[in-house]
Image: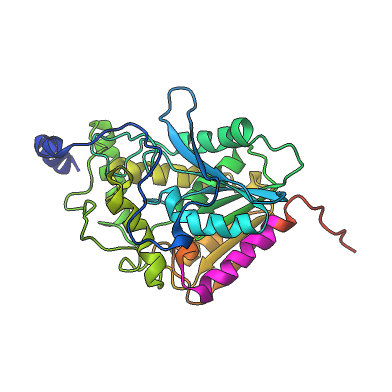
Amino acid sequence: MRRFALVLLLALPLFACGEQGSRAPFADSRTPPGLERRFLPPAGWAWGYVQVADDKVQRYGVSAPHGAATSQVLILTDYGESAETWFETARDLNAKGVVVWILERQGQGGSERLAGRRDRGHVASYAPDVTATKAMVKVVIRPDGRLPLTLLGQGQGGLVALRAVEEGLMTDALVLSAPVFELSSLPCPKGQLIETAQWARRLRLSSLPWPGAADWRRDGPDDRALGLTGDPARGAVNHAWQTANPDLRMGAPSLGQYAAFYDVLDVTARDLSRVKTPVVLLAGDADTVTPAFAQDSVCKGLADCRQTRLPGGRHALHLERDSVRAPWLEAVLATIRSAGRPKPATP
């Protein structure tokens, strides 16, 4: 590990030469040419920013149904996603009377960056994500009981959502969509990666990626090519928005991102008994991003968790083909509709 740390030190000037781009938050995005109407912003979509103390600014968006709202949902995005990726789902939920809030992760989407290179996925800790989630609910959304609130975390956003509830966030229901509680594909053995990331953190080099990791490319793979979805149209959406908007681009994670992921994973697994909120875990049986055994273990450790596995579903369930996405969406809507309702008495 000391030898690898020396390599990082020697490589620093080369990495520094490639650092570029603004760290500032980014609001209005340009619509990709030729994008289907269903992938465009819902009517009345509005952007906002949330910041807690000295943490970085995070971007959120919101849209409301045309008629009277019956409920609301806060969506936490996965690694590499922006709120734009969720516009089709926001439209579908608005059409069912749901107010949709989407909070982007720190250092991703239109949120302020921590690394000088804007397309580097880098954080020092997941704590600001958790804090921003709690602030969104308490300060921005401010639920008053009239509209039940469901928290939906996708992928790594599911880990953030679960940790926020462990830390006392009050919500009527929690949906974990393809939650990432372990990573199936790593650049090296897990123990070696964690030790290397910790060394990089001590040497203040944690914003560097694993050597050889891929940066974002215009001709790079979209979500279908990456195996995140089997739907060609939906699989192209995220890359289309990032192609049209350089500020939204996201490449490989930094060593610090890996260190922060495993840090929060440890404390979240330790505190599962704190969660009293009803949890619905939705996962695809063809997900290659995160292993099923980790999801099973977490669900078993929760007081009230129901798990559904969708046949043929990959990781990005909200971007899947209709045969997978339709039952996923119906399960999400069923949870939202039942949120806040008292449970029937057990005979």
Q: Where 247 sits versus 244, above or below?
A: above
In the picture, measured across the screen, residue 231 lies left or right of residue 347, that is left
Q: Quadrant of the C terminus?
A: bottom right
Tell me residue 121's x, y (percent).
31, 44
The image quadrant of residue 56 is: top left
Q: Nearer the viewer, residue 163 or 323?
A: 323
Does 269 appear in magenta?
A: no
Please identify the dominant SS of the magenta region.
helix
Does 332 appear in magenta?
A: yes
Tell me residue 244's x, y (percent).
29, 51
Q: Quadrant of the N terminus?
A: top left
Asked which colour scheme the image uses, the reply is rainbow
Q: Residue at x 55, y 57 (%)?
A: 91
Asked whether the viewer can see residue 179, the reply is no
Residue furthest out toward the right: 347
Tell me residue 78's x, y (percent).
44, 52
Q: Residue at x 66, y 34 (%)?
A: 142
Q: Nearer the viewer, residue 170 or 189?
A: 170
In the picture, measured across the screen, residue 53 lies left or right of residue 99, that is left
Marks counted in the figure total: 0
Tell me residue 262's x, y (percent).
40, 46
Q: Nearer the viewer, residue 281 or 303?
A: 281
Q: Nearer the viewer, residue 21 or 183?
A: 21
Q: Where 58 sits versus 80, above or below?
A: above
Please report the bounds of the magenta region as a residue range.
320-336
Asked whether the viewer can see residue 129, the reply is yes
The image quadrant of residue 135 is: top right
